[in-house]
Amino acid sequence: MSIFSTFRGDIEKIIDGLAASGALPPGVDTGSVTVEPPRNAEHGDLTTNAAMVLAKPAKQKPRELAGRIADLIRSVEGVAEVEIAGPGFINVRLDAAVWREELRGVLRAGAHYGDSDIGAGTPVNVEFVSANPTGPLHVGHCRGAVFGAALVTLLRKTGFKVTSEYYINDAGAQVDALARSVHLRYREALGRPVGEIPPGLYPGEYLVPVGQDIARRDGDRWDAAAEEDWLPEFRAHAVKAMMAGIRGDLELLGISFDVFTSEVDLHGADAVQAALDDLDAKGLIYTGVLEPPKGKTPDDWEARPQTLFRATAFGDDTDRPLKKTDGGWTYFASDIAYHRDKIARGFNAMINVWGADHGGYVKRMKAAVRALGDGKAELDVKLCQLVKVVRGGVPVKMSKRAGEFITLRDVVGEVGKDVVRYIMLTRKNDAPLDFDFDRVVEQTRDNPVFYVQYAHARIRSVMRKAASDLPELDLAAAALADADLETLQHEAEVALIKTLADWPRTVESAALAHEPHRIAYYLDDLAAQFHALWNKGTENPDLRFLIPQDVSRSRARLALIQAVAQVIASGLEIMGVEPVEEMR
């Protein structure tokens, strides 16, 4: 529980009381009532929109209703001042004792401060990365991988039962192209002339050892064989080799998955046909002719009867084809089967993390999930925008088809896992992100990972000095919770406590919005406030964290900064970053 959720509970009790007295309609909906920090700290500690939300159903003017609610809020324990602002906001200022008690709560809860049960054990499937197994992961995949992993940790911290999943796209034309590319490398390993890699195949050097491996194992068995004989074998071997590399790449980032699901396995189990039979039974499959695409019509487009899904009945812009001209299933049909499988496994809440180039695919997939789940299943798609890699101030161009790209392994090897994971979360997922190799290793305020880690390292340095200079003090967090916190009077100290108190609300809001970047934003603000207090201490000896001649005040300030370090470590854990003990 946070101060904000506790106070919201007080507001709900007040509303219930007003309803019981006839001042509000019985059973009035309070779902839109919020309690949060005001945008301007000068307006107080908390603000609620309760009167504005309830005025219409109560048939009252917002400010008049705010007055009634405000009178009752004044009797809530810990409330110091209440005022009505604007069209009916109620601003509240709390007693200083409330904030000191919250600081004790931070220290006593330890790493569990900010944990929540809002998820109530709801099963959630988070599918991310799911890169085609046609080569190593590159820096673009890295963003989705980090985002997905952080989201999984965030949801688990807030009480959801999360399964992380990787969908292996091991069927289709791109995997056949991979197999043919490996066959060329196999023949090359046998000493056969290969020449230029034909267009449409993968020229990357990473396929050389895959071809060599097959040559060592099978000799020239496949050299003169017909393609229909060697293609299945090369496809299976290539996918296995690529997935082993992908798993290894992800391990470098500290990322693992609970489940790997194969598209080939779904096809083999006739899952696609079963899914479409299900939709057909609901009257959602028909044969029809689609209108031509908007804008310039492609040269190869033709009006022809197709097997279609009624996606427009579920919010899509057009109905969607399920079969290709050769009679094979479309990618969309396969994805319908995959999401039906998720629903069958008990997931009515699904989150897919995709690259920005899949934006046009979102509506149809959401429509399919609504149809499959009879309105009970929901899919949230988080699109990750491109990562622009910069070195020496110059953008680095990449092309996977040309075999020219910066691999995830290269990036992690150069700057380390923690830097990569942190930087990938410093922007909202749908905003472009620059990964500047020069900036991410700078020890400056402009480097957010350094700035936050430096705050943690500074605190650990103070705690080590305290253990040396004040050996009589018990520096365990639980012991510091009993410090005399009355000495924390400076506005910068109180502001820091208030920011700490906002951590549980930040965690919950980030989890519900599926936005782990909010954790990075919060940590940056917390670090900034800590560094500001540190700088005040260098200018004013009375604000130093350690005052040997005043053990009581030192203990209170150590309690404060220990809580800061604790919350920083908790936030970094969500992001998959290890807090540092000292800067190098």
Image (tube, helix red, strand yellow):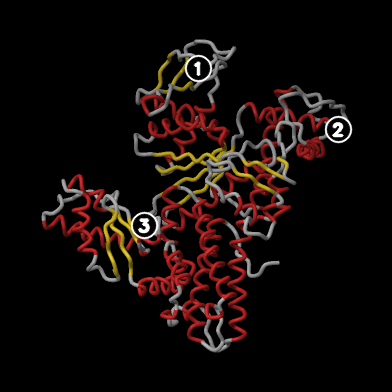
Q: Are marks 1 and 2 in contact (CB under 8 Å)?
A: no
Residue bearing the label numbered 3: 36
9 relative position to 146: left or right: left
Question: Which mark, by number, is residue 350?
Answer: none
Does 268 sit above or below residue 459?
above
**Which quadrant of the figure contains the N terminus?**
bottom left
Task: Please tell me which residue is depicted at 44% across the width and 80% down the height of the picture.
Answer: 487
Question: Which mark, by number, is residue 293?
Answer: 1
Picture mark count: 3
Does 324 sit above or below residue 178?
above
Amino acid at dot 1: Pro
Residue bearing the label numbered 2: 190
Return the residue nearer the eye: 543 or 28.
543
Q: Residues within 10 Å of mark 3 (few under 14, many from 20)?
A: some
241 relative position to 371: left or right: right
Q: Give the image location of residue 201, x and y in percent.
A: 73, 27
Return the residue nearer the eye: 555 or 263.
555
| Residues at marks 1 and 3, CA–CA distance in whole angstroms | 46 Å
Nearest to N terminus: mark 2 or mark 3: 3
| Residues at marks 1 and 2, CA–CA distance in whole angstroms | 48 Å
Amino acid at dot 2: Leu
Nearest to N terminus: mark 1 or mark 3: 3
Q: Secondary structure at mark 2?
A: loop
Q: Secondary structure at mark 3?
A: strand
Q: Are marks 1 and 3 in contact (CB under 8 Å)?
A: no
**Which quadrant of the figure contains the C terminus?**
bottom right
Q: Closer to the camera: disc 1 or disc 2?
A: 1
Q: Residues within 10 Å of mark 1 (few under 14, many from 20)?
A: few
| Residues at marks 2 and 3, CA–CA distance in whole angstroms | 68 Å
Task: Please tell me which residue is depicted at 62% across the width and 65% down the height of the picture.
Answer: 454
Return the residue nearer the eye: 190 or 435.
435
Q: Give the image location of residue 270, x and y in percent.
A: 50, 29
